[in-house]
Image (cartoon, rainbow, N blue to C red):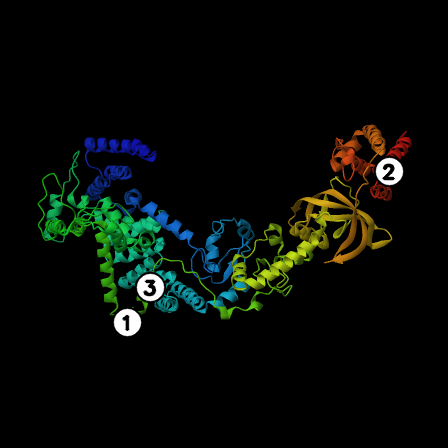
Amino acid sequence: MDLAKQAFGCNNFELATDIFDHLLQTHGPNMDWLIGRGDSLARRGSMNEALGDYAHAFRLGEVTPERLNELVNALVASVSKKGGLTSSIQRCQSKLKEQPSDLFSCPICECLLYDPTTLLCGHSLCKDCLHISLEPRTCAKCKVNHSQLVNSNKVPRVNIVLGGLLEKYFPEETTARRRRIEGNKLYAQGKPEDAIMKYTEAIKLVPHDHLALSNRSHVYTGLERYDEALFDAEAVCEIRPDWPKGYYRKGVALKELHRQEAAMVAFLQSLTLDPFSISAKKCLAKVLHNFLSPVQPESIKCLELQRNFARQLRAGAPVSPGLSSISIANLADEVALGFEAINRLLVVEEKEETDNSGSEDGKTTEEGGDEAVKTPFGKTPSLPDNKTNQDKCLKTTPSTPSPPPSEDESPPPAMLGSVQAATRGRKEFSTSELLVMRKRKRCRSLSESMMSPTRSVELKFARLDLIKKIRRVPEEKIDKEDYECSLCFRLFLEPLTTPCGHTFCKLCLNRSLDYSKACPLCKDCLSDYLATRNNTVNELALHLLQEYLGEEYQQREQQHKEEMEAMAKFVSDQSQCEVPIFVCTLAFPTIPCPLHIFEPRYRLMVRQTMDSGARQFGMCLPNPNNPDGHEDMGCMLEIQQVQHLPDGRSVIKTIGGRRFKVLSTGMRDGYNTALVEFIKDVEVTGDEVAIVTALESEVYQQAQRWFTSLPIFHQTRIMAHFGPTPTREAEPLACPQGPSWTWWLLAILPVNKRIQTGIMSMSSLKERLNALQRCLVRITDFQF
């Protein structure tokens, strides 16, 4: 037995079957061995033989439904595989994904957003659904991780702007959702009748609310009103045929109505869509348990069936007729036929298909024999002619007596006999004919239910097609004032929603957070939000702006674009332009200059510089005579990398660029600006070329000797801050700003800042080299 379990655990089902066969032949029937062999056969795909072993095990002792878990798993896998349901469901789901999504719907419940809560990724969910989605800590739509919300126990609040807009635009759906939530609370309080009233009110407002129908079906089941529960569950399956819970509700109602075959099909449909549903598996196991349980001795016929049942297991014994009637093909067809709404997505109407295939080139299919009709799930059976079909129906009619079982065959139990009787008269029909019969049966049931006045209102959603309806906002309800930022009092530009539920322009919010970590409206601390630096735009708010206020939003974008272009004019090769000024230290061309940004004005300056695409700003020394001013000479810095810190500060890596001379100063948004004129070296021509070239080589050698004469500690500190000595250019006179090593030398020379500023302002390379040479001579003489 241990060896058989080990083989089964290693998925070696053939070996496990052989071991159980040996045990049964050697020691005789045993309930555990029969169930073990049934599990192995079921996992191998021999479902009918497995059912025979299960039925025999039921005769030997009490078998709990939990012992049929392996049968359930194997049955679901076999039905999906043999019926081709998995690929069809996948095609249906891919087709649904191709359809445009409705941003007003919650990605979890697929109903109108109620108490919309916006995550840091920009997607909005219902407040109640958010608690479900936060269990795996990922957004249900984009799968972005939001574990920081769960760890800090700060779940985002309701989006105030979206909540008011949705209630204004869709009052009926919002009221229906409120009624459904009230019904849930009443049911939790033990008031099912009051809950049904709330669900009914919600359904009258929104007939296609599948969640209200599903909840009412559940309450009906608890009140043992199974017919009404079945009706609501079937409506749910019509509205959401891709939702496994609808089929589960249907199966529960059918099971309580003692329609075991239909319940089995419904649970299989639910498990086809969601193979991991524990509730559906348990219910399917109970249904199978009812099928396989021995008949009770309530009649002479039942006693006779039990006496004639083969109690001794023989090798190669055939399966009983009742068990063989439950074939996987029949179950697969039944499950496929149940997905009627999915069929409408995958195939064209049968009539159109027949007309197109039968009238090609003006010819009919009468001379071509039987015509094949394609079905969405399963094979493409051939349709027999009327005469042949009638003959087969006469031969398989239920009134025809069946031959008595032979000595080697075991009579079926009563429940399994009902399955055989139900399938015996229709197994000769093709799948397409069964589909037509199923539709007619449903139409008859709907016609009968029309006699009830309470059902007349609900019939209109029983034939709904599975189409994602895109909600449209009434144009008369659009008001521009609903989309104004409370900071700049202009139309939202790239709206961001904070965890406290307030929405602002992206620029306005970031500028406010430069000065304070609190929300501008409610003063709630936004340090965690600031640390993420996500800045993802609210998807639904942006959609509303672009869809219903398109012209106004384009004007707002164009205005912002012009402002950014004005800030980035200095990027182009111009002699004069206005640039932002960072008053801090002295920077040099081609030399790295790391900066720690913590002041609010410079946070804004760096962000605007990055947003405009310029990625450059000017650096000047402060003016000792004017605390609010700066020197008239500076250097442009180009931002290479920005590292944001959790508290809003940042460390940026920059490198020096062009030199400039300040013509006039100004202010913008709290930081300094200046009208500057860029400085270029005077071109060296004529006899000066040889002289400057020789001077450049001589000064370079002097600089190398001086640097190597420094202590190792000083050399290491210099290279750690300014980098190693730049290599000499092949053509030093061709560089617009001069050789890069000259700026590196000027940056490390221990001279006054004013002397360095004076040397940097020189536009002649010859004069700059002479000045550097004089500094090297003075420093060398001082050292020695």
Dot label at residue 767: 2
Name the spot of residue 177 as percent of width and height, x first.
43, 65
Q: Nearer the viewer, residue 354 or 462?
A: 354
Counting other residues with Cα less than 10 Å from the Cα at mark 3, is it few (<14), some (14-19), or many (20 or more)?
A: some
**What residue appears at the point 85 percent right and 34 percent down from the top-left corner?**
688
Q: Is residue 699 above or below residue 516?
A: above
Choose mark 3 or mark 2, whichever is in front: 2
Q: Looking at the image, do the residues carrying marks 3 and 1 touch, with CB atoms under 8 Å apart?
A: no
Q: Which residue is mark 3?
A: 461
Q: Is residue 405 above or below residue 27?
A: below
Which quadrant holds the N terminus? top left
In space, the residues marked 3 and 2 are separated at their CA atoms by: 89 Å
Check disc 1 and give the amino acid type. Answer: Pro
Dot label at residue 117: none
Name the spot of residue 56 as percent of width and height, x first.
19, 41
Counting other residues with Cα less than 10 Å from the Cα at mark 1, is it few (<14), some (14-19), or many (20 or more)?
A: few
Name the spot of residue 733 as percent of width and height, x first.
79, 35
Q: Which residue is mark 1?
A: 453
Q: Earlier in the sequence, mark 3 or mark 2?
A: 3
Drawn side of residue 422 relative to residue 40, left or right? left
Element class at badge 2: helix
The quadrant holding residue 74 is top left
Check disc 3 and give the amino acid type. Answer: Phe
Drawn side of residue 322 relative to residue 673, left or right? left
